[in-house]
């Protein structure tokens, strides 16, 4: 298998015990399969993976796009469609990007 050009990481809130818990798991039911099917339908050179907890539960479900390091929060099927459209154009979906609050020392 060759290295895909884009990797979608969808938080599924898996904890160390291996049990899915939390916001991403509860709100994101079916999203992993949806992203996978959309990528195949679009002919995208992509890999779709579920992850353990990404630690921003208040923004769940969370989707990360690599190698670009674009983070998206509160994703649903409609937002995923917009994100995939942008990725196909080689751009982030600006209106949906998750921008973390700066940490003050």
Image: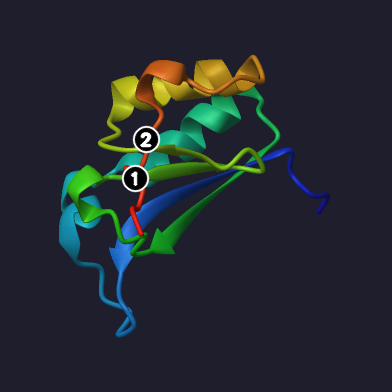
Coordinates of residue 55 in the picture (x, y in percent): 31, 61
Q: Percent from the top left, x then y, of residue 65?
A: 54, 40
Quadrant where the C terminus is found in the figure: bottom left
Q: Quadrant of the N terminus?
A: bottom right
Nearer to us of marks 1 and 2 is 2
Within-10-Å neighbours for mark 2: few <14, some 14–19, many 20+: some
Q: Which quadrant of the structure image shows residue 33?
A: top left
Question: In the rendered view, would you say 20 is above or below 103?
Answer: below
Q: Distance between the Cα atoms at labels 1 and 2? A: 9 Å
How did the renderer colour the structure?
Answer: rainbow
> Is 70 placed above or below 12 here?
above
Left or right relative to 59: residue 93: right
Name the residue at 16% across, 53% down: 26
Rendered location of residue 90, percent (x, y): 66, 20
Query: In the drawing, what numbered circle is on residue 46?
Result: none
Give yes or no for contact between labels 1 and 2 (Cβ–Cβ under 8 Å): yes
Name which residue lies at 52% across and 16% down.
Answer: 85
Question: Which label is found at residue 62?
Answer: 1
Which is more N-terminal, label 2 or label 1?
Answer: 1
What residue is rendered at 18% in x and 45% in y?
Answer: 27
Q: Is residue 72 rendered to the left or right of residue 46? A: left
Q: Secondary structure at mark 2?
A: loop
Disc 2: which residue: 98
């Amino acid at each position: 298998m060759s290295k895909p050009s884009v990797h979608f990481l969808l938080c599924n809130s898996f904890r160390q015990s291996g049990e899915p818990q939390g916001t991403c798991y509860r709100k994101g039911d079916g999203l992993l399969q949806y992203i996978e099917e959309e990528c195949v339908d679009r002919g995208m050179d992509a890999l779709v993976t579920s992850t353990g907890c990404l630690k921003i539960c208040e923004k769940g479900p969370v989707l990360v796009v690599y190698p670009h390091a674009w983070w998206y929060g509160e994703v649903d099927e409609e937002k995923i469609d917009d994100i995939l459209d942008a990725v196909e154009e080689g751009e982030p979906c600006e209106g949906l990007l998750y921008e973390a609050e700066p940490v003050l020392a």
